[in-house]
Image (tube, rainbow, N blue to C red):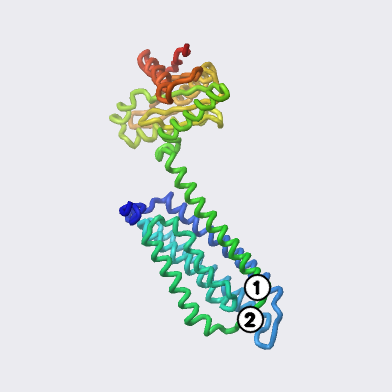
């Protein structure tokens, strides 16, 4: 337990392009929303400001609308450029630190400017909401230290040397509280989005982006349960690229990966939106076809087989075409477990391979 608490992920590995885009989407886009909301709040308070001898409306606009909005906007734009140009290919920990400084600085600008609002220092805690996103306890401790240091700067310098402190006002307090609530919701939404993206990655195959082997069996068990409860029949199919080892040996593994990706294209064109496709393993693919009997499922399988066979691959040896063998089985009785049922489709696939490949074979009906 202690080892896992010290380090949740490998923070030294580099962030790839797709991951960096997710970081930018989640954090930087969240701050853009917060920036816009903050500007609206500042303009709202400006409308109700009553000028006095110490502060004219123009001076108030400069202090509490133009100054923070421009400062946060420049900060955010510079961070966006820096992230895209320099940071996105760095290690997870460096990207985390960059995001931490970005969010903390963004909050600090508002707090240091709006020194007269008693609730504003609470904004320095907002970056802590994003700590679960870093998944690194050292970053969490560092974030707490940064927030504390920024608050000390607020108390030691910005509050005593504020150019103007408007009198306390109930409208200001209520508006700022509502704004803080909105900011919290925005940041929590981004953290939830991060978890959703991570969960989606965990159930997908990285090469094809189809569901993986484990997720396929979870879905299969779900449909088996539906059959037990409501007698909703369904079918499954398993497809295998014929002579795939020869493809890799002849053209290389990178070309083999491209052939695997094209199976996804054939699957997408050959089945409906409600069907569940997965990369079962290696060059094998599986599909669950809800509410479809063996004949309809076999028709879909045949359509997929034809579409894949039609795909042309350009090689040094000229244009090449590859084929699929497919086995299909319908769930017509209760099986002991998912593996036992899926063996029926696997046996049908074996028969398709044995009888010449590039064909669809159906499992015999269960008695």
Residue at which label 2 appears? 166
Q: Secondary structure at mark 1?
A: helix
- The residue located at (53%, 23%) in the rendering is 228
- The residue located at (48%, 69%) in the rendering is 105
Q: Secondary structure at mark 2?
A: loop
Along the viewing direction, whichever of 234 and 262 lies nearer the viewer: 234
Can see residue 323? no
- In the image, taking residue 317 as reference, residue 218 lies left or right, namely right
Residue at which label 1 appears? 172
Along the viewing direction, whichever of 304 and 131 lies nearer the viewer: 131
- The residue located at (32%, 28%) in the rendering is 247
Q: Tell me if label 2 and label 1 are in contact, CB under 8 Å.
A: yes
Pinpoint residue 4: horizontal percent, then vertical percent.
33, 52
Quadrant of the rendered image containing residue 346 = top left
CA neighbours of label 1 inside 10 A, class few (<14), some (14 to 19), many (20+):
many
- The residue located at (47%, 63%) in the rendering is 128
- Which of pointers 2 and 1 lies earlier in the amino acid sequence? 2
Pinpoint residue 90: horizontal percent, then vertical percent.
36, 57
Question: In the image, is residue 141 above or below residue 205?
Answer: below
Question: In the image, is residue 147 above or below residue 259?
Answer: below
- In the image, taking residue 222 as reference, residue 354 lies left or right, namely left
Pinpoint residue 59: horizontal percent, then vertical percent.
64, 81
């Amino acid at each position: 337990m202690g080892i896992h608490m010290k380090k949740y992920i490998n923070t030294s590995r580099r962030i790839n392009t797709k991951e960096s885009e997710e970081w930018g989407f989640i954090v930087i886009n969240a701050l853009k929303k917060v920036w816009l909301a903050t500007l609206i709040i500042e303009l709202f308070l400006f409308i109700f400001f009553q000028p006095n001898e110490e502060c004219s409306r123009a001076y108030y606009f400069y202090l509490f609308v133009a100054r923070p909005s421009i400062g946060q906007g420049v900060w955010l734009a510079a961070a966006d450029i820096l992230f895209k140009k320099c940071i996105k290919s760095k290690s997870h920990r460096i990207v985390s630190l960059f995001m931490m400084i970005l969010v903390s600085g963004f909050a600090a600008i508002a707090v240091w400017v709006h020194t007269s609002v008693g609730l504003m220092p609470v904004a320095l805690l907002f970056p802590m909401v994003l700590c679960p996103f870093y998944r690194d306890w050292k970053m969490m401790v560092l974030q707490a230290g940064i927030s504390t240091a920024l608050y000390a700067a607020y108390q030691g310098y910005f509050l005593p040397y504020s150019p103007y402190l408007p009198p306390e006002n109930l409208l200001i307090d209520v508006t700022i509280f509502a704004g803080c609530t909105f900011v919290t919701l925005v940041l929590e939404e981004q953290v939830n989005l991060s978890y959703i993206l991570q969960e989606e990655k965990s159930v997908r195959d990285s090469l094809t982006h189809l569901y993986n082997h484990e997720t396929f069996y979870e879905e299969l068990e779900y449909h088996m349960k539906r059959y037990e409860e409501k007698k909703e029949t369904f079918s499954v199919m398993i497809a295998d690229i014929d002579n795939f080892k020869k493809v890799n040996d002849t053209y290389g593994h990178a070309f083999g990966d491209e052939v695997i990706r094209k199976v996804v294209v054939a699957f997408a064109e050959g089945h409906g939106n409600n069907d569940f496709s997965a990369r079962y393993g290696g060059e094998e693919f599986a599909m669950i076809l809800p509410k479809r009997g063996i004949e309809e499922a076999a028709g879909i399988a045949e359509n997929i087989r034809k579409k894949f066979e039609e795909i042309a691959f350009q090689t040094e040896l000229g244009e090449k075409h590859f084929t699929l063998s497919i086995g299909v089985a319908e769930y017509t009785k209760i099986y002991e477990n998912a593996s036992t049922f899926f063996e029926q489709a696997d046996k049908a696939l074996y028969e398709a391979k044995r009888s010449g490949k590039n064909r669809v074979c159906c499992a015999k009906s269960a008695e």
